[in-house]
Image (spheres, rainbow, N blue to C red):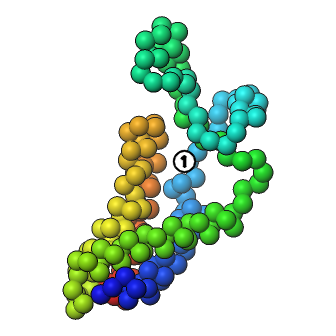
């Protein structure tokens, strides 16, 4: 097996995961509670107005040495602490986001194909290919969410939901690779 020889499972799994992702995020109820409204949305919007797109942290402390300042320590104690992502103004451009998602699913498919082509023999059975591609897909789709909970305060409940989504995508990917490889 070669990566090029696995082009069909790469493309088919990418399309199936794209459809599953759209169904999960648009039709299923479990991500509806992921985001919350701030206590005073208009004040927060006014405070962030003019901020360039990027990642922000508050209180902002440049390095460990800054934590020695009593004023800075008090800011952390008093709160709030936040990690904020500011994106460009304007209505969300769903077309480009969907295209980038599909490209991401193709990249995961290529990574799965790489591992399958390097670890499975040409006559490998369905289950062998399923295990390899499914495990790689689960890691690719989900494992990074854990560090977001550890370091950036993403609620663990959201990480568990995202890991569950990743498991669904991995099972679909593994199934397609096992079937078509």
Task: Locate the N terminus and report the quarter of the image it occupies.
Answer: bottom left
Q: Which residue is at a point 37% across and 55% down the rendered structure image?
A: 143
Q: Which residue is at a point 56% across and 48% down the rendered structure image?
A: 33
Asked if residue 14 shows in the view, the reply is: yes
Q: Could you tell whether 158 is left or right of 92 in the image?
A: left
Question: Number of callouts in the render?
Answer: 1
Q: Quadrant of residue 100?
A: bottom right
Q: Nearer the viewer, residue 176 or 103?
A: 103
* Crowd rating for badge 1 (residues with CA inside 10 Å; few <14, some 14–19, many 20+): few
Work out whether 154 lies above or below 113.
above
Task: Residue lying at the far bottom in this picture: please name it.
Answer: 123
x then y, percent, for residue 26: 61, 64
Q: Nearer the viewer, residue 76 or 169?
A: 76
Disc 1, SS: loop
Q: Could you tell whether 21 is left or right of 97 in the image?
A: left
Q: Which residue is mark 1?
A: 34
Work out whether 120 lies above or below 39.
below
Task: Locate the C terminus and report the quarter of the image it occupies.
Answer: bottom left
Q: Which residue is at a point 32% across and 72% down the rendered structure image?
A: 134
Asked if residue 20 shows in the view, the reply is: no
Q: Nearer the viewer, residue 41 or 136?
A: 136
Q: Could you tell whether 10 is left or right of 103 in the image?
A: left
x then y, percent, for residue 13: 45, 79
Q: Which residue is at a point 24% across and 90% down the rendered structure image?
A: 122
């Amino acid at each position: 097996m070669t990566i090029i020889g696995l082009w069909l499972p790469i493309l088919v799994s990418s399309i199936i995961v794209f459809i599953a992702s759209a169904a999960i995020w648009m039709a299923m109820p479990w991500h509806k509670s992921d985001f919350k409204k701030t206590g005073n949305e208009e004040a927060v919007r006014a405070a962030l107005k003019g901020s360039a797109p990027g990642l922000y942290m508050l209180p902002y402390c440049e390095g460990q040495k800054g934590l020695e300042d009593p004023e800075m320590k008090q800011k952390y104690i008093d709160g709030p602490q936040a990690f904020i992502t500011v994106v460009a103004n304007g209505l969300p451009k769903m077309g480009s986001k969907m295209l980038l998602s599909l490209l991401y699913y193709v990249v995961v498919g290529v990574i799965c194909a790489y591992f399958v082509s390097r670890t499975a023999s040409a006559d490998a059975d369905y289950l062998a290919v399923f295990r390899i591609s499914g495990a790689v897909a689960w890691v690719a789709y989900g494992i990074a969410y854990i560090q977001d909970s550890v370091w950036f305060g993403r609620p663990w409940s959201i990480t568990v939901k995202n890991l569950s989504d990743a498991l669904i995508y991995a099972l679909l990917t593994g199934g397609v690779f096992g079937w078509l490889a």
